[in-house]
Amino acid sequence: HLEISIRRPFPEHLQRPYHHPRPHPTQLPSMAEAFLRPPGGAAIAARGKTERIRYKDCRGNPTGMPSVPLNHIIVPFLLVLLNLLVETVDSAHVFDAYRLIQFDRNGKPFGSRRSQVYHMAAPAKIKDIPDPGADSRRSNEDSSDADSTKEESEGKKKRRSTSEDLHRKLVVVSMFDVNEAVLNKLIDKRAAAVVLIVLPTDLSMVPSETLMEWKKIEQTLLARQFQIPIYFAFDDERLQSMVKNLESGMGSSEPSSSVPNSTDEPTGTNVRYQLVAGTSDASLIQKTNIVNMHGWHRGPHFNGLSDLGPIVAITANFDTFAVAPGLAVGSDHNGSGTVALLELARIFGRLYSEFRTQGEYSILFVLTAAGGIKYEGMKAWMKQNDHRILANIEFVLCLENLASPSSSLYLHVSQDPKDQDFMPIINNFEDTAKHMDLPLEVIHTKLNPDKDSPLRWEHEQFARKNILTATLCNYRHPQPGKTIYDRMGSIFDRIESVDMKILSRNIKFVMESLSRLIYSSPEQHLDIASHSHAVNEKFVESWMSYLGREPRAFPFLSKDSEVVKELGRVLDTHTVGSKLQASKLQNVYKFYKSSTYKTTMTIYKVKPTSFDLLLGLAVVAYLLALHCLLKYGSISAVFTMWKTKKD
């Protein structure tokens, strides 16, 4: 029961104590407001009386409950809490980051050896990096004032070293500002703890000169070890805002008080940025597997391994490599060769499904891995399969990089193109190129007699066994790597850099050239790749799109990898007798695997100490105000009581 006592006479209905019947337990929630709001409270307020309303429970004890509704107390607290939550969520930004690869060669470490990030961000200030010889040249010119110049130079160096030191800092730099000299200065001279390289979202807008420069930078990143984490990330609005604030001085890696005598440092009230990637270091891959697969279109002379008949083989390596395994999608190298092989398998599959359109040759389609490590995948496939298959192969065509915007094609051979057996095959390609008005150049590169020398082309594996072979690609010279990979890809080899029409044209060219050999019609243009057997551009585009977003970096692929399963499935659909084979890599390389090759990095806005102090004072003030409302009914009542006691 709740009793209200009034000190002066009021209307009769207000003089009687208010007795509320004992409610049923199920009615308690609905009766809460009735207990908190006394009858006649509105009338008292309207009459402007100052009488004190005393609340009593059923035993007559004062409750001290104010005449304030519950929502007037809770709602402000909820609003403050909600504002703090929104501010906390808004201050954090999560994005994907891709770490530099880590590996060993003959026991010597290469790549990034660390992965954990818990550092404050700092601007690179690349334009302010001093010339190492500037001070010495200046001192030589001012030899007459040697003493004063020396003191001034030392003071400048001291201030410069304080502002340029990146120890325990994460430096954020755009790819357009990076070159080999800048990387060496940031890591070796300025001692950056972490380097985050920001890539543009649309790589098609990157100038070709910048891409060529970055191919050299990628080789440099693989040529040495780094005892710091190096990450790549694609640009977005939050990263742009952070970089802009850091460069303009609105964001700081530390309070300005830590850098005395500095006029360009931001004040202590500025926002600082902390980047966190809570991941563990990479672990060694104990067993490196090579996964190969192949399928057949059996010709009329195929009677099992005992009588295979003549064979034409088409090969391509389906994996790739780049400095950041999470970005190694290799759309052109060698996603284009893989898609071309799959489309050729599909077209020839329709032709060989009927006896009257079968050719004189059986066709073997081979997809191999480890194309960059001296084509170890093809070497493993040749060892694993029956030697009678190699004995019956009459020609092997290797496909690489067929989707470059360049319109030229190059047919690389190791045997003499004027050889009596090889010349008809070369003529098939040259005549077809003339018929399609396609620029083609045959390049003869003699085979290196040293068996231990690195291979320049995949077809050289077959040339050493005296099998007629060639490689079709869109570049004139091989691209040997000076580090781990003889033929490495790039993180910029993405779907935006390929031309689908060029790829479809090149697939048709291969189809027409091989058809003249397979159907024994060297003097006729068969135009097989037309009508129902034409190149399916939707099939090509869909597979290029799929491979363009699936990282395929060796050696992080296995039989259970999703991309390997999909390739095996489509090869099994369009060929017969398909087979997937796995073997262990016998090499001097050891690789490290970690989820950090693609990890989530978080940016936190770190407020200065003054912000925490102000927030703490605001919380204390709010709690005091809430206490006054609960105990005295209003804050003004507290001041009235204090004034009364003082008087």
Image (cartoon, rainbow, N blue to C red):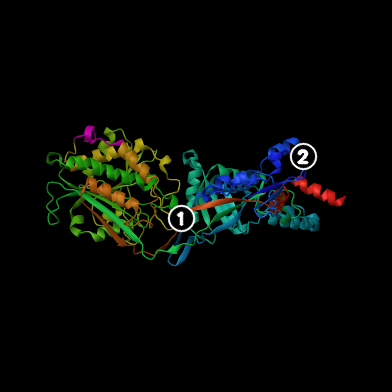
Mark seen at residue 387 = none
Q: Find disc 1 in the rendering and name its residue.
A: 597
Q: Is residue 326 magenta?
A: no
Front in this rendered view, residue 397 or 269: 269
Give neighbour class at mark 2: few <14, some 14-19, many 20+ (Cα, 10 Å).
few
Give me the residue at 22% from left, 59% from top: 385
Q: Is residue 309 left or right of residue 511?
A: left
Magenta-drawn stretch, dominant element (helix, strand or loop): loop
> Which mark is first along the chain, 1 or 2?
2
Query: Magenta segment range?
Result: 524-537
Q: Is residue 526 magenta?
A: yes
Q: Amino acid at mark 1?
A: Tyr
Q: Most extreme residue toward the right, as rendered?
A: 647
How many angstroms separate mark 2 from mark 1 (CA)?
A: 73 Å
Q: Find disc 2 in the rendering and name its residue.
A: 49
Front in this rendered view, residue 498 or 138: 498
Q: Is residue 364 left or right of residue 562?
A: left
Front in this rendered view, residue 510 or 230: 230
Q: Is residue 272 visible?
A: yes
Q: Residue 114 at x, y = what percent?
A: 52, 61
Q: Amino acid at mark 2?
A: Lys
Q: Is residue 285 left or right of residue 35?
A: left
Front in this rendered view, residue 149 or 307: 307
Which of label 2 and label 1 is nearer to you?
A: 2
Q: Is residue 476 visible?
A: no
- Element under disc 1: helix
Give me the residue at 12% from left, 39% from top: 356
